Amino acid sequence: MHAYRSHTCAELNKSNVGDTVRLSGWVHRIRDHGGLLFIDLRDHYGITQVMADPDSPVFAELEKVRSEWCIQIEGNVLARDESLINKAIPTGEVEVFIRGLEVLGQSEELPLMVFGDQEYPEETRLKYRYLDLRREAMQNNMKLRSDVVMSMRKRMWDKEFREYQTPIITASSPEGARDFLVPSRLHPGKFYALPQAPQQFKQLMMVAGFDKYFQIAPCFRDEDPRADRSPTDFYQLDLEMSFVEQQDVFDTIQPVLQGVFEEFGGGRKVDQEWPQISYKDAALWYGSDKPDLRNPIKMQVVSDHFRGSGFAIFASLLENEGTEVRAIPAPGGGGRKFCDRMNKFAQGEGLPGMGYIFWRKQSPDSIAQERGITVKEVNALVKSGEITLGNEAAGPLAKNIGPERTEAIRQQLGLDVGDAAFFLGGKPKAFEAVAGRARTVIGDELGLSDKDRFAFAWIVDFPIYEADEETGKIDFEHNPFSMPQGGMDALLGDPLKVLGYQYDLACNGYELVSGAIRNHRPEIMFKAFEIAGYGKDEVEKRFGGMVNAFQYGAPPHGGCAAGVDRIVMLLADEANIREVVMFPMNQRAEDQMMNAPSNPTSDQLMELGLRVIPQDQ
């Protein structure tokens, strides 16, 4: 018999009754039933119930065992009584009577419990991550992550891609985030960088003629943390292809990701159709370039209904160039209480409030006031059929702009009695993000969003340039290495109208994929940077390796990268990316378990030719 185990804690069943077995694992739970000890023994694979009574030769030793001790037991497999079968676990039909015990590792008092659903501060969980990871939910998340990565690899190989590894120590990257710098001992005063992405190397592979590349790649960026982003490192499914157009990349990655979500989505619906939405339309309709299409609400421009209206705030605002008013439809939100809650939401976002209109069944009071007759007379006319109660718009904004304009708004938005609409105005960039968040809140509160679904959309046609509002200076708004649509001819016109072959994939409000068809023509690349104020010398200095390679017959190429951590986060139905990363940093980019970042020794600094300047606290 094996020194530690003949079976795992998930293998035993009725066919093993009468066998002598050896199991190793952790004491998950202890139950003392008056002289009869039951222990749930846990390993990576599952749980087996083991037990002993005073007839067991190790009963006295077993009484000393505590939660999370690592032990090895030897004993006989017994069938459980029919009434005691636990159908929730694979080993629920049997138990093991213990005849031998060896303590492999004692445990001190636990800083956090592994058994049960107790909540602990994240700092505690990360400091004792090795204990936190013993919990069933975390074990399942990490197994899911491993299985997803394996599935991605298999699907990419099936598409005739090969996996190649790129350097981890390299030069500073053009990705745009902050680099993690690594000082060079052999070249004092010079620094390497950890790669923000394998971007330049995978493009160089295309120049080298490898045609189809992929990698489950580690990426390093010194970023501010968010719930859906790690502050230090992350993994992505990185791919690149030669001789392709934008649609070829979509057609390649869609079945891979769709298959992964179908395989690991737990039965949730996975959309088969992935619409392509322009960046401009995404901002207008959803207030975000990573829209959640499970929410059916689409915002619309309603500026014309407010021009010259009695609502002075919007009417005067629309006299300024570049301003507009947008409406957020709220089907089913036609009540004053809901409208007041949304007003409170807007105030929490730093706005004075949010204009609204809601539609209700016309009341006899309002008709009486309108016609100058009594309510009793109105009721009589309604009863006789001479008057039909229609719908009416309510709310302060409705009173200001009048019934004709409110009716036109209702018809444009396709709303009816019991519905509402909320309004924001100004320069779109100033309010789009708030409008997007309001859309999400409205969809959630009114139960409009289909939560049991993965809804995907390609966001395309990103503008390459933007102008600074104060100085008018042109700079890159998005990836400077994307091929401009229209090539060199596009760069000779208005730069603010230039769109790139750049794309993102959104799913349920998260960006899962980002990519582009690359600018592989040196003359177009130099011109693109020149428009943003970067001379040829600077481009060659910063990106010389790639620019030089493009002088030697570079093929058209493009690709993308899919965030592994974020994909697993969605599949695991977690709201925080740290729940699916084995050893994540905390919100301050610290590893309290390993004490990183740490202070270097004087010898290390001397060897690297560095001196640390103390910072004021």
Image: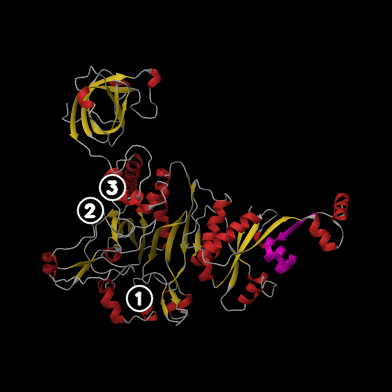
Mark 2 touching mark 1, by CB under 8 A?
Answer: no
Query: Above or below — where is 274 with respect to 135?
Result: below
Which residue is at 53% across, 56% downward? 440
Residue 46 visible (yes or no)? yes
Q: Residues in magenta?
A: 389-411
On residue 129, the disc is 3
**Which residue position is annotated with label 1?**
525
CA distance for labels 3 and 2? 10 Å
Point out residue 471 in the picture as x, y percentages from the top left corner. 44, 83
Rendering colour mode: secondary structure
Give, as a three-letter code, the residue at label 3: Arg
Mark 2 vs 1, N-terminal side: 1
Which residue is at 33% across, 56% downward? 236
**Quadrant of the rendered structure where residue 596 is?**
bottom left
On residue 555, the disc is none
Q: What is the secondary structure assignment of the residue under circle 1? A: helix
Mark 3 vs 2, N-terminal side: 3
Is residue 406 part of the magenta span, yes or no? yes
**Quadrant of the rendered structure where residue 95 is?**
top left
Crowd band around label 3 with a 10 angstrom C-alpha radius: few (<14), some (14–19), many (20+): some
